[in-house]
């Protein structure tokens, strides 16, 4: 990686501290404040499907055909792709929080503007802007969610959050039952008010989202480790107060070289040279789900009204039932992605939905059973497909390094969705407009084939990420840099020491006697707990004749000994909390406890609690 963006090298336990947290009110705030973006997306995408039939009717106030409705869907997806790329890069550069507020405001303004559409070109424009806001949300929000949710439940929570898209879809369909009722509202007014629902929901989300903090993982990578420590400390204090339990000390640390920026070219190089199989997997997963979902979602209203004769005012009933089945998939199957595993469940979801989609095509083409049988098979197909589609977002946000997460989500979403999400609505829209059932059936079969490719790719290239720390699934690039730098510095130091010793022994006039070296006590550097004036641990006079390991200070060791002497026996977690070891720095508490035990001043009893022995001579 380029050196011109380097800040410094730090050791941090922030990821371990976040992953060890019990589920609490803070996590619900993250779910509501960030996860609600999928409700908005579901509302927007399905809203067009719900009102599509009305917008093509005479007297609606806007002159649009079924083909133009499909085009509008494709333009919305194009906007989402552009927004994901643009805002994704800004998210990795300026932070998750700043961008997920900006993108929400863009969505809010654009969706209000949609209600004032007066022609096809204006409708296309505002749909593009609405999609751009949602696409930006994907990058900022997905990365923030996965960086704040504990690893042990990350799979099911991520799937349920992504699946909440369908709650928005069902809600949008339910509201249009009112807005499309011409006994209550005129044709040219009802569909416009339907888009105002998104505005009201976005305002609520904005209020909640303002309380969600910046991702601590992003902060310490970008040189703001003090702020990361403060945020994690506040989260821990809030959870301890809520649960009345003391959190255990973190067990892992990671060393990273901080960076201000990482270029788009660098990120793509990482994806396609270090992780080429993972890159192919993500592209195929996104293309498959985007083609099937966007193709059907944007045109489902016209399928029911055009081929089954369902009245425009009744179409939302079918949309509601279908949407609820989509939400049920991740809720029912989500936990198995954390237990059975990502690879078997993702491949099952993709391949299973592909098989059912082929059955759906034959039933539709043969005009078997009418609209209710068609709906039943559609429900089964998307019960499976929705889990796979949600898992595509989960996969790309898990399997690439931390520094690239937001932009990786944006890139694979944009490329995969551009290929599948734009082609799908255009293909389905054109075939539906032809009025030929066989052509629409072929569209279902093509969608099934693309989904099946996703299932095969998962079988070949899938990653076992269930329950694993994000930093273990894909080591941060900056962690690798830090390790390389440490090895290089160690090598250079060793070479320098060897050269110095050779110079001392030989000198310009030949060999001479090696000078006597000071003993260990005079060489050892004593440290006091807490930062010095330069922001590092400052020298402190020795308080013991024993040498203190370089990773701890004498005061830290003696503080533990004195506390145990006064409060014995004491548990390690209780001790960690009581002496404020959280502020010492990564790994220092455990190192200090080991040193106190090594000295013989402290020992563990049979119950694992620490007791004072007094042997510190």
Image: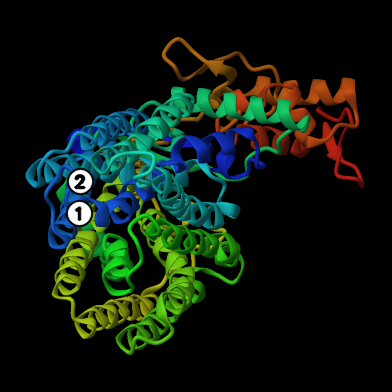
Residue drawn at (18%, 55%) of the image:
56
Out of 46 and 336, give the one closest to the viewer.
46
Q: How far is mark 1 from mark 2, CA to CA? A: 6 Å
Q: Position of residue 414 (x, y in %)?
A: 22, 55
Category of crowding for the residue at label 1, using alpha-carbon neighbours closer than 10 angstroms: few (below 14), some (14–19), many (at least 20): some
- Name the image quarter holding the C terminus: top right
Rendered view: 505 above or below 8 = below
The residue under label 2 is 60
Count numbered badges in the picture: 2
Out of 582 and 200, give the one closest to the viewer.
200
Left or right relative to 242: residue 221: left
Q: Position of residue 436 (x, y in %)?
A: 18, 81
Rendered view: 438 above or below 169 = below
Residue 113 visible in the displayed image: yes
Q: Position of residue 252 (x, y in %)?
A: 57, 45
As helix, strand or loop, the secondary structure at mark 1 comes to loop
What is the residue that sits farthest to the front in this orientation? 183
The residue under label 1 is 57
Left or right relative to 477: residue 26: right
| Picture quadrant of residue 183 | top left
What is the residue that sits farthest to the left in this orientation? 121
As helix, strand or loop, the secondary structure at mark 2 comes to loop
Left or right relative to 258: residue 420: left
Contact? badges 1 and 2 (CB < 8 Å): yes
Residue 508 visible in the displayed image: no
Q: Position of residue 39 (x, y in %)?
A: 42, 45
Rendered view: 252 above or below 74 = above
């Amino acid at each position: 990686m380029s050196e011109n963006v380097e800040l410094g090298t730090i050791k941090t336990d922030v990821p371990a501290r976040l992953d060890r947290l019990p589920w609490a009110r803070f996590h619900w705030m993250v779910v509501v404040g960030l996860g609600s973006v999928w409700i908005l997306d579901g509302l927007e995408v399905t809203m067009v499907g719900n009102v599509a039939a009305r917008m093509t009717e005479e007297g609606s106030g806007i002159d649009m055909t079924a083909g133009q409705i499909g085009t509008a869907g494709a333009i919305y997806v194009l906007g989402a792709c552009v927004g994901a790329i643009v805002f994704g890069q800004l998210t990795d550069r300026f932070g998750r929080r700043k961008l997920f507020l900006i993108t929400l405001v863009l969505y809010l303004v654009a969706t209000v503007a949609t209600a004032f559409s007066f022609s096809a070109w204006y409708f296309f424009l505002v749909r593009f802007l609405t999609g751009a806001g949602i696409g930006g949300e994907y990058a900022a929000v997905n990365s923030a969610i996965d960086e704040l949710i504990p690893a042990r439940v990350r799979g099911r929570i991520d799937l349920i959050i992504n699946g909440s898209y369908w709650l928005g879809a069902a809600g949008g369909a339910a509201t249009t039952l009112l807005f499309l009722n011409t006994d209550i509202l005129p044709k040219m007014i009802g569909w416009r008010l339907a888009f105002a629902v998104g505005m009201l929901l976005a305002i609520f989300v904005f209020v909640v989202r303002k309380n969600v903090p910046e991702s601590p993982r992003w902060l310490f990578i970008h040189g703001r480790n003090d702020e990361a420590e403060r945020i994690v400390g506040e989260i821990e204090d809030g959870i301890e107060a809520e649960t009345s339990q003391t959190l255990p000390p973190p067990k892992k640390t990671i060393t990273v070289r901080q960076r201000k920026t990482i270029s788009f070219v660098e990120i793509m190089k990482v994806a396609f040279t270090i992780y080429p199989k993972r890159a192919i997997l993500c592209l195929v997963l996104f293309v498959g789900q985007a083609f099937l979902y966007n193709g059907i979602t944007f045109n489902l209203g016209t399928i029911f009204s055009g081929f089954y004769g369902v009245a425009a005012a009744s179409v939302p009933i079918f949309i509601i039932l279908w949407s609820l089945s989509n939400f049920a998939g991740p809720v029912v199957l989500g936990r198995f992605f954390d237990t059975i595993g990502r690879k078997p469940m993702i491949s099952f979801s993709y391949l299973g939905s592909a098989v059912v989609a082929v059955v759906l095509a034959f039933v539709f083409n043969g005009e078997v059973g009418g609209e209710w049988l068609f709906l039943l098979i559609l429900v089964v197909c998307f019960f499976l497909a929705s889990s796979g589609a949600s898992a595509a977002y989960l996969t790309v946000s898990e399997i690439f390094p931390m520094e690239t997460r937001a932009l990786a989500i944006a890139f694979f979403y944009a490329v995969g969705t551009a290929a599948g999400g734009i082609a799908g609505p255009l293909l389905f829209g054109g075939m539906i407009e032809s009025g030929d059932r066989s052509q629409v059936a072929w569209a279902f079969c093509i969608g099934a084939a693309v989904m099946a490719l996703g299932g095969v790719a998962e079988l070949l290239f899938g990653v076992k990420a269930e329950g694993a720390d994000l930093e273990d699934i894909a080591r941060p690039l900056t962690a690798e840099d830090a390790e390389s730098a440490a090895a290089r510095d160690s090598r250079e130091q060793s070479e320098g020491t060897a050269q110095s010793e050779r110079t001392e022994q030989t000198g310009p006039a030949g060999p001479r006697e090696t000078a006597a070296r000071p003993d260990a006590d005079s060489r050892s550097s004593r440290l006091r707990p807490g930062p010095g004036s330069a922001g590092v641990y400052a020298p402190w006079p020795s308080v013991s004749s024993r040498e203190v390991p370089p990773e701890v200070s004498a005061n830290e060791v003696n503080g533990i000994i004195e506390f145990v002497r006064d409060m014995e026996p004491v548990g390690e977690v209780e001790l960690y909390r009581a002496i404020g070891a959280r502020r010492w720095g990564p790994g220092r508490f455990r190192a200090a406890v080991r040193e106190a035990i090594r000295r013989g001043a402290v020992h563990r009893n049979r119950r694992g609690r620490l007791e004072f022995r007094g042997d510190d001579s």
